[in-house]
Amino acid sequence: MSKYLKAKTVKEDNEFENFVDGILNDALVTTNLQGYINMWYPGAIKIFGYSSAEAVGKNIKLFSCLESENMEKLSEKMFEAKSSGKYFGEIYWKSVSDSFKSETYIQPIYKDFLFVGYSFVISRHIEKIF
């Protein structure tokens, strides 16, 4: 790897860490290509009510509202993020205690130029559903 690429990678890693530190009140979740959660950051614990041990290894779609139509929409939004580089909009989610609509940002994750998964930033509740 060239010095330029190494420096760029370190810079991106530092930017990501700063990004994580700045969104402790939002849920930051990372998944693999199939949507299985590999990182569940502190904001996700606060918003969803599940510990990292309960969430890691589960599919992100399980935290989407149970209606199959919404799960399909989540898959479409993930595909859109991969195709266009990002998705930003409202998605319906469920926590331990309720279901809610939230602004959600989805971005593909690349490692060594290979697409390896997704990052989700899910804001605090916008509107409780039930």
Image (cartoon, rainbow, N blue to C red):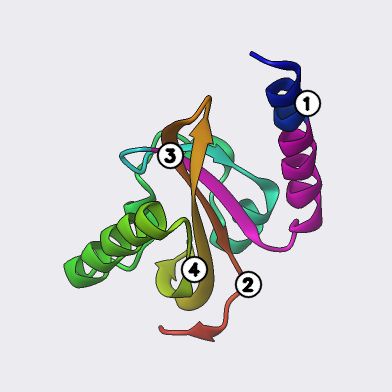
Q: Position of residue 13 (x, y in %)?
A: 73, 34
Kind of residue at badge 4: Ser
Residue 103 visible:
yes
* Label 3: element kind: strand
Which of discs 2 and 3 lies nearer the camera? The answer is: 3
Which amino acid lies under the numbered mark 2 shown in the image of this protein? Answer: Arg
* Circle 1 crowding by C-alpha within 10 Å: few under 14, some 14–19, many from 20: few
Q: Residue at x 42, y 84 (%)?
A: 129
Residue 98 visible at all = no
Label disc, if present, on residue 117 of the rendered structure: 3
The reply to whether discs 2 and 3 touch (Cβ–Cβ < 8 Å) is: no
In the image, the segment drawn in magenta is 11-32
User: Residue 70 vs residue 88: left or right?
Assistant: left
Q: Quadrant of the N terminus?
A: top right
Q: Residue at x 50, y 53 (%)?
A: 107
- Identify which amino acid the numbered label 3 is placed on: Gly
* Vertical relation: 63 (above or below) 57: below
Q: Position of residue 127 (x, y in %)?
A: 52, 86
Q: Residue furthest top?
A: 1
Give the distance between the C-alpha atoms of the residues marked 2 and 3, in whole angstroms.
23 Å
Per the image, the residue denoted by label 1 is 7
| Closer mark to the observer between disc 4 and disc 2 | 2
Can you tell which of label 1 and label 3 is closer to the viewer?
A: 1
